[in-house]
Amino acid sequence: MNRKGYYGPFGGAFVPEILEATFDELGRIFYQAKADPAFWQTYSDLMANYAGRPTPLTFAPNLTAHFGGAQIFIKREDLNHTGAHKANNVMGQGLLVQRMAKRRVIAETGAGQHGVATATMAARFGFDCTIYMGAVDVERQRPNVFWMQRLGAEVVPVETGTRILKDAINEAFRDWVAHMDTTHYVLGTACGPHPFPEMVSFFQSIIGREARDQILAQAGRLPSRVYACVGGGSNALGLFHGFMDDAVELVGVEAGGHGQASGRHAARLAWPDASIGVAQGYKTYFLQNADGQMRETHSVAAGLDYVGVSPILSHLKETGRVRFEAATDDEVIAALSLTMQKEGLIPALESAHAFVQAFKEAPRLGRDEIIIINQSGRADKDIFTVAEAFDDPQWRAFIRAKAEKYREI
Ligand SMILES: *Cc1c(COP(=O)(O)O)cnc(C)c1O
């Protein structure tokens, strides 16, 4: 990184002038914390005793035998409290909010996972919490809305624009401008204006630090390749951090949706469909039209369904340090199925993208080689989507019976 959060030509902080002092304060507090070994200790103690870290690195003997190539290890971010790596980021930001002596947090959420994680953190730290969510997403993601409210957060349905994630982001910024003295905006991934990409990946680096120690302890050597799915890029950067300076190939897997030809996907770096632009406060590759209008993206995994990507990853793509691939919705369902049946693990639909690519490559690698797949989360939240993908008649009957019951009351 060079001046003001640039990674090569990517990144920066394109924020309204009125927020500049708030960003400066956030940066100051973050760099103080980052330089303070006691802060990392406090953070890892919190993660150990509240969130369940360190998460295990699990050898997958049955998948390894099935593919007959590389030894497959899985980093278990699904075992974090709230079911994904998102806890690493929100709890870290919670500690920074304490340091800034603020008492209110806001966030925006699409699928609701980041909203639930933020509401959880706010409950634990005693902060007021407001979550902005597109009105369309509020309807689509009722279970997460329910949990956020039960956790004590106020969920605000955003009725402007197309009433989805990007509209919620605008609304959250508006709130921040109006309440910046008391309020911190908890960004959910390694995107947005500086210092967020660096800050979020700093907290997520706990994944890679642990994974490196664990593979050395268990196997006595480093992997040849590591795989992570890429939405905004935070779990991938977290895992990659541990192996950045090693002779380890880093592979990021994006949402291929219905395939490149369909145009319905969210592959910004794997396929040449995106172009460089500035939006939402930072410069990166966006899926946009020639006139800079954001395109509609699609993925079976809500957490990967996003037009932008971390500026750090855009830079690592251009320097060639990270290789990017894409997995289609159909491949993802097949990989999820196989992983459940072979290992009894239930990766989130997002995480299953990384499994797809690892499964394509494992057979071609030697039996003495090691690969690590990041299981960024668990699939409990995906039960409706997965049941639909399998077109399960018993599930359909179950939903119909529930609907019937609610019609009566
Ligand atoms: C949110 C989410 C992602 C995508 O976010 P990144 O910032 O790219 O890591 C991936 N996996 C799971 C389980 C998620 O909840």
Image (tube, rainbow, N blue to C red):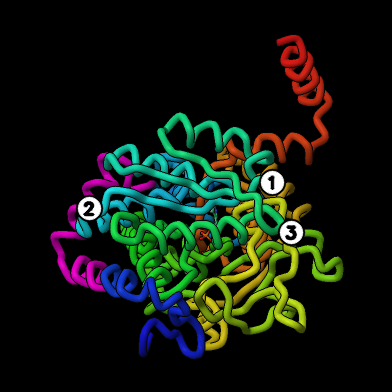
**Residue 361: x %, y % from top left:** 65, 66
Q: Which residue is mark 3?
A: 298
- Whether residue 279 appears in this view of the structure is yes
Q: Earlier in the sequence, mark 3 or mark 1?
A: 1
Q: Residues within 10 Å of mark 3 (few under 14, many from 20)?
A: many
- Whether residue 43 appears in this view of the structure is no
Give the side of residue 101 with respect to residue 211, left or right.
left
For image coordinates 70% across by 71% down, the residue present is 294
Instruction: Check the image and name the residue furthest to the top.
Output: 408
Mark 2 and mark 1 in contact? Answer it, CB < 8 Å: no
**Residue 378: x %, y % from top left:** 54, 42
For image coordinates 62% across by 74% down, the residue present is 324
387 vs 269: above or below: above
The numbered mark at residue 98 is 2
Asked if residue 377 is among those painted magenta in the image, a careful observer would answer no
Give the Cα separation between the discs numbered 2 and 1: 33 Å
Within 8 Å: ligand 1 and the Cβ of disc 3? no
For image coordinates 45% across by 57% down, the residue present is 175
User: What is the three-letter code of the residue carrying label 2?
Assistant: Gln
Q: Earlier in the sequence, mark 2 or mark 3?
A: 2
Q: Earlier in the sequence, mark 2 or mark 1?
A: 2
Magenta extent: 28-55
Give the side of residue 301 with respect to residue 309, left or right.
right
Q: Which residue is mark 1?
A: 136
Q: Residues within 10 Å of mark 1 (few under 14, many from 20)?
A: some
Secondary structure state at the residue bearing disc 2: helix
Secondary structure state at the residue bearing disc 1: helix
